[in-house]
Amino acid sequence: MPTVDRIEIDLFRVPLPVPMEASAAGVMRAFDMVAARITDSDGVTGVGYTVCHEGQGPAIAAICNGPFRAVLQGQDPDRIEGLWRQMYKAVHYAGRGGPVTFALAAVDVALWDLKGNRLGTPLWRLLGGANPKVRAYAGNIDLNFPVDKLLAGGLASVEAGFRSVKMRLGRPTLREDIQRVAAMREHLPDEIELMADANEAWRVHEAVRALHELRPFGMIWLEEPISPDDTAGYVHLRQLGLVPIALGENHHTLPEFAALFSAGGVDMPQPDLTTCGGITPFIKVARMAEAFNLPVLSHGAHDLHIHCMAAAPNAAYLEWHAFGLDQFMSDPLKVSNGYATAPERPGHGVAFDWDRLKALRPD
Ligand SMILES: [Mg+2]
């Protein structure tokens, strides 16, 4: 077997075409991307990356460059589960979620891509091959938009081929949020699905009131109405049975997902491979959701998630949100009639223009 020969870790600061605002994060103008390129002794390369808020990338890149490089160098790159476990253990004391799982994601995706490239097989086939066609939704981030711009964004998503559109909640008053939802529902054609993300805006009693007021709009789900750490609160909100409850982008480890599932705190789990440690744990969360008779949704990084979702028999919705990275890809994923189709290229098939990215290295 070949061994890990070269490990290249890069940090890029990618400006967003339009500043975006969500309740938990505030206004975002750029994202940090940490990329890992792993080349084996036969000269085959795999590419991985993770994405985080501006300023958090250097810590993640340092974990990749330090302890993870030490684990990987000279090892058999095909032994992904074993290497993942070794990396997790190497840093668990100052781990286990947070920057560690973001760093694991960059490396894990590179190892899977390398494996796919070696075999000449697309990842979605390698990971299980359920159905290449996955329903996609537009994950608009529009909390700071005035109503006319909000509605124009919703319609632009429909014109771009989506049949499901998500908007943000968490304005200063619930009354304003509900007015925005009513305007959006009125504006979009009836057959277009609507969902909402409150990005942790409320406490439980506020979320209860919001769920009652949102119920008449027939939303597909309400996402992160309260802090992701409040499992008891989520159990309560779910038991009301008013609007399906979604969360998962801020759950970083398998035990966190296990606790949420076994408590009964979620209808629509939304793991994100870039935050929970890569493809390896994402697939486990998807299988765990299946065992709990739940669907699986993805969060962000749709060019990677399309493979995990196409591999999962319980896949429900792929979020469309590339953090502005699609402009640096030679053949980004496309949506048509509400669906995206997993590519047949080997590995994940994402090809970056590295020369253009190089200009985005922060000082
Ligand atoms: Mg969200």
Image (spheres, grey):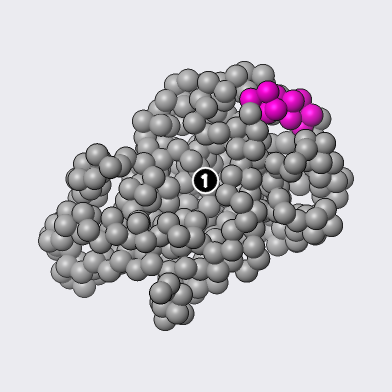
Q: Is residue 238 left or right of residue 177?
A: left
Cβ(mark 1) to ligand 1 < 8 Å?
Answer: no
Q: Quadrant of residue 242?
A: top right
> Does residue 84 show up magenta in the picture?
no
* Picture layout, residue 138 above or below residue 315: below
Residue 23 seen anywhere in this rendered image of the structure: yes
Question: Percent position (x, y) of residue 49?
Answer: 39, 60
* Picture layout, residue 24 above or below residue 306: above
Give the magenta part as a residue range.
Answer: 204-214
**Rendered residue at 50%/73% (across/down):** 328
**Rendered residue at 47%/52% (across/down):** 305
The amino acid type of the residue labelled 1 equals: Ser
Question: Percent position (x, y) of residue 68?
Answer: 23, 55
Q: Is residue 103 left or right of residue 311?
A: left
Residue 178 seen anywhere in this rendered image of the structure: no
* Picture layout, residue 103 above or below residue 15: above
> Does residue 209 show up magenta in the picture?
yes
126 vs 87, nearest the viewer: 87
* Picture layout, residue 32 above or below residue 163: below
Q: Is residue 21 left or right of residue 62?
A: right
User: Badge 1 is on which residue?
Assistant: 298
All told, the count of numbered labels is 1
